[in-house]
């Protein structure tokens, strides 16, 4: 079984019920463009701790790397995703190593793991080739 990283205080049953109720509410509309907004912040909140825990357990953290690489690919290809940090993101794109610079915007600690950075870099290359 794969580990699940959830806060100990989370009432999973209630969370699930609340989530299902939210998505059954036809008055709430979720546009893809809206969901994509503030990607850097969403990545920072959702992925670094999981990636670091996975790496500490000797796993690749490929799930996290995949999501991070997908965002990096869009950003590196000039896609404006609507982010309050867009100036900082654009500046990172011009760094000598934009992959590391962009990962650092999400969580500088991730850049300390050479294997994880290499995995993300390889995924970005793969996605850019498609």
Image (cartoon, rainbow, N blue to C red):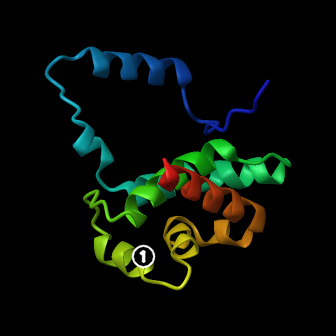
Q: Is residue 34 above or below residue 94?
A: above
Of residues 11 and 32, the one drawn nearer to the viewer in this rendering: 32
Of residues 64 and 19, the one drawn nearer to the viewer in this rendering: 64
In the picture provided, is 69 more to the left or to the right than 32? right
Q: Is residue 102 above or below residue 38?
A: below
Q: How dense is the environment of label 1, judged by Cα within 10 Å: few (below 14), some, or many (20 and up)?
A: many
Q: Which residue has dot 1 on it?
A: 93
Q: Is residue 87 above or below residue 30?
A: below
- In the rendered image, residue 64, in percent from the top left (x then y), is placed at 61, 47
Q: Is residue 110 above or below residue 56?
A: below
* Residue projecting furthest to the left: 27
Say if residue 41 shows up in the picture: no
* Residue projecting furthest to the front: 129
Q: Residue at x 47, y 60 (%)?
A: 72
Of residues 6 and 11, the one drawn nearer to the viewer in this rendering: 6
The kind of secondary structure element at disc 1 is helix
- In the rendered image, residue 37, in percent from the top left (x then y), is placed at 29, 52
Q: Residue at x 72, y 72 (%)?
A: 112
Say if residue 84 shows up in the picture: yes
Of residues 10 and 31, the one drawn nearer to the viewer in this rendering: 31
The quarter holding residue 91 reads bottom left
């Amino acid at each position: 079984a794969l580990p699940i990283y959830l806060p100990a205080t989370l009432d999973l049953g209630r969370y699930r019920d609340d989530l299902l109720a939210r998505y059954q509410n036809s008055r709430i509309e979720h546009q893809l463009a809206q969901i994509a907004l503030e990607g850097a912040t969403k990545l920072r909140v959702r992925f670094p701790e999981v990636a670091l825990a996975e790496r500490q357990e000797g796993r690749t953290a490929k799930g996290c790397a995949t999501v991070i690489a997908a965002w990096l690919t869009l950003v590196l290809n000039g896609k404006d995703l609507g982010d309050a940090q867009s100036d900082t993101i654009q500046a990172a794109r011009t760094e000598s190593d934009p992959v590391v610079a962009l990962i650092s915007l999400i969580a500088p600690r991730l850049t300390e793991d050479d294997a994880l950075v290499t995995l993300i870099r390889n995924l970005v290359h793969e996605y850019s080739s498609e």
